[in-house]
Amino acid sequence: MKATRLKAPRLNLRRVSLRRVNPRRAVTLIVALAVVAAAGVVLWPRADPVRVTAYFPRTVGIHPGSDVRVLGVRIGEVGDITPQGERVRVTLEYDPGRKVPADARAAIINSSVVSDRYVQLLPVYRGGPQMRDGDVIPEQRTAVPVELDRVFDSLHTTAEALGPRGANKDGSLSRLLGVSADNLEGQGAQLHRTVEDLSLAVTTLSDGRQDLFSTVRNLQVFTAALAADDKSVRSFNDSLATVAGQLAAERKDLAAALRHLGVALADVSEFVRNNKKALTSNVEGLSKVTKVLVTQRAALAELLEVAPTGLSNLQNAYNPSSGTLDTRNNPDHPQDPASLLCSLLSTTGEAKAADCKELKELFDSLPEPVPSAAPVAGTGSIDRTLGGILGADA
């Protein structure tokens, strides 16, 4: 195949001769274009700037037209500046396309000692609510630099206060410095150690500030509770003061009682040490007695119920003229000795069911006693002691 060669088309350019253009027409045309461009720039609709009001304690070096910046980049300018009592009202204007945080702060910054100052808005917007037209930055969120003349005035005032007409009028300051220098001479290491220890203490307090603040809050709650219950607290304090007064008045008796108590405790300790075996045996016996009382608590309860009636019947049965108990025997229902003995053994916890059965068989195997003649009433000796219950002289 043969390669096809492409030919570029020829352009016929017409040469325009400037000699044919009228200079007056050219100037008129240029002026008309400039007027149209200026009118377009002036009449072109633009959005109104965002106006924010900020309050400063003073505005030295700030005037209408000063820059409003964010991170040093100009975004607007200062509008009106109006003094209001002890503060100054400043209007800040910036482009609506700029984003500023709703809680932004304003600070007057001086780039050098002699140059004009500007207003810096900070921090940088990183999301969240934005500042709107008409918002206010209060004085608590504004800052101004320290003026150089104020620094000079403070230094001058300090120098006069410490000078020969002030604190050093009689040489007191000079003597103080001399004595301090003598006291601190050779104490550099100790002073350094003291500063390090103070730094560690401050660090410890900083690390435990949450616990410290929690303690302070709890103390505040406790104090508030005491304040709310002031009457009870006062009554408690009065009672405590009364008790303290009584103890103070009887301190001699208390001291004597404590001494006697010490002697008594020593005697008790010696008694327990010397009678350890006997006390142990007594405690074991008391344990058995307590066990019997526990097992027989129903019988004891019944005894406590019928004892008053029984004692009353015993008093009524006693015959003072003969010194006897006038009772009536019931031979139709004799007492079973096996049951009586088994009941007595049961109270000590020694008897069992098999033992009671053997006792019954033993008593049943014994021969029945032969009845004797009934005694004649009024014969025989009279026991005036009731079997030893009453005294021998009764």
Image (cartoon, grey):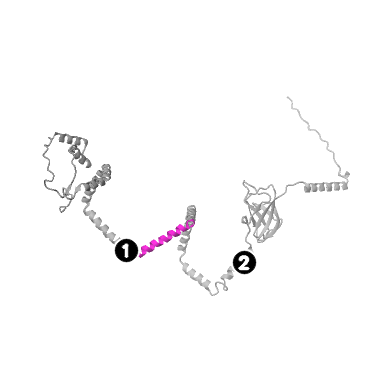
**Along the line of sight, the residue nearer the viewer: 373 or 304:** 373
What is the x, y in percent for residue 216? 49, 55
How much space separates mark 1 and mark 2, taking CA atoms? 73 Å
Q: Residues within 10 Å of mark 1 (few under 14, many from 20)?
A: few
17 relative to 214 in the view: left or right: right
Q: Which residue is mark 1?
A: 253
The answer to whether mark 1 and mark 2 are in CB contact below 8 A is no
In the depicted structure, whether residue 356 falls above or below residue 192: above
What is the x, y in percent for residue 313? 23, 46
The residue segment tinted magenta is: 227-252
In the image, is residue 245 part of the stretch drawn in magenta? yes
**Label 1: element kind:** helix
**Along the line of sight, the residue nearer the viewer: 212 or 70:** 212
**Along the line of sight, the residue nearer the viewer: 110 or 134:** 134
Instruction: Give the amino acid type for the residue marked by disc 2 in the picture.
Output: Asp
What is the x, y in percent for residue 220? 49, 55
In the depicted structure, whether residue 346 falls above or below residue 131: above
Q: Which residue is mark 2?
A: 153
Q: Quadrant of residue 239?
A: bottom left
In the image, is residue 72 part of the stretch drawn in magenta? no
60 relative to 348 in the view: left or right: right
Residue shown at 26% from the left, 58% from the top: 266
302 relative to 56 in the view: left or right: left
**Label 2: element kind:** helix
Instruction: Give the amino acid type for the residue marked by disc 1 in the picture.
Output: Asp
In the depicted structure, whether residue 178 falls above or below residue 243: below
